[in-house]
Amino acid sequence: MAFLEGIKNSLKLDQVGNEVASKLNSARTFIHQQQESLGDHLMKSGAGPAVKMVKEKVFNLMPHNLTSYFGGLVKFAPGASGKQQSPVDIVSSLCIFDESLVDSQFTLSYFSEDAVELVNTGHSWQINMKVDSRSVLEATHLNSTYKLRQIHCHWGTEPMNGSEHIVGGVGYAGELHYVHWNLKYGTIEEALKFPDGIAVLGIFLNETHDDNPNFESLVKMMSKIPYKNETLALNNGFNFMSFIPAKLEYWTYEGSLTTPPYTECVVWTVFRAAIPISSRQLDAFRSLYTVAIENAETTSECRMLENVRPVQALNGRIVRSSFKAGGVAQ
């Protein structure tokens, strides 16, 4: 019930955030109209290019993606007062090399036919699994078998501000999350009550010029789910392994969900190696809308340009690594 209440509260905060954003959008439009009126008057008086420059500078002080900006800002607050929040900055000098993880064995038993639908959640695109999914994860550092529940993605506006986790203060263009729940708890609702209830694989996205063929089918589907709550049936399933890095060096730590209600129930596995994605392919993700079509009064202000939670304090937590610091993962 606590989880459900958390969801209800987050939805209420979403509504408040969107109402605030709507009012700010109206204010922004009003300011723009006043600037245009004043500018026209001064231009006729011979003020010329200087007036145009001032108008542009003042106008650009206000965020252009207000619904996303303020809606997201409000959502950072609920349930986020714990001491084991995610994401975090992974600083190599502070990580503990754990020899027991060196020969970690990952068993990624993913079945493409388990993917049932692609959804625009208003915060990201998300691939959902069918209820009787057989896709599971096992690994040396996990104490149980975890069932894959969904996959979603985070991204930003620039090549280094789209990942939720960062490494030594440096981010990536995006971050995929494979979300699993611990089968020993029977249901995902029960699993959310325990610190090892959820296991998330984090995979960094490195922005490149060339398209990544593995993303292309997904990119093409974005046009089918432009607005919040729109879904697309995945009749041909989905190749989950196409986004898993070839080299499985990783960091692991105990943290939380990075979206409401921010429950501290996650064993994080963040892979060191990033996978490529082109600027064009990222733009397809950014083209999604954060609102349902009936609420999109000014759709240009509702693009899903970024959906990243800020880095949280470690508060004494230990981040373990399966590799010694130094070198570059391939």
Image: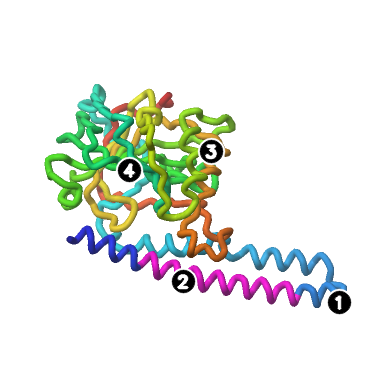
**Which of labels 2 and 4 is toward the front?**
4
The stretch drawn in magenta includes residue 31: yes
Q: Which residue is mark 4?
A: 128
Q: CA distance from mark 2 to mark 4?
A: 31 Å
The stretch drawn in magenta includes residue 131: no
Q: Residue at x 41, y 26 (%)?
A: 329
Mark 2: amino acid: Val
Label placed on residue 45: 1
**Which of labels 1 and 3 is toward the front?**
3
- Residues rendered magenta in the picture: 13-38
Label 3 near label 1: C-beta < 8 Å?
A: no
Mark 4: amino acid: Asn
Disc 1 element: loop
Q: Earlier in the sequence, mark 2 or mark 4?
A: 2
CA neighbours of label 1 inside 10 A, class few (<14), some (14 to 19), many (20+):
few
Q: Earlier in the sequence, mark 3 or mark 2?
A: 2
Q: Residue at x 52, y 59 (%)?
A: 302
Q: Earlier in the sequence, mark 1 or mark 4?
A: 1
CA neighbours of label 3 inside 10 A, class few (<14), some (14 to 19), many (20+):
many
* Residue 195 falls left or right of residue 200: left
Q: Earlier in the sequence, mark 4 or mark 3?
A: 4
**Which of labels 1 and 4 is toward the front?**
4
Q: CA distance from mark 4 to mark 3?
A: 21 Å
Label 4 near label 2: C-beta < 8 Å?
A: no
Q: Which residue is mark 2?
A: 20
Q: Quadrant of the N terminus?
A: bottom left
Between residues 321 and 275, which one lies in front from this camera angle? 275
Between residues 117 and 25, which one lies in front from this camera angle? 117
Report whether residue 326 is seen: yes
Q: Which residue is mark 3?
A: 281
CA neighbours of label 2 inside 10 A, class few (<14), some (14 to 19), many (20+):
some
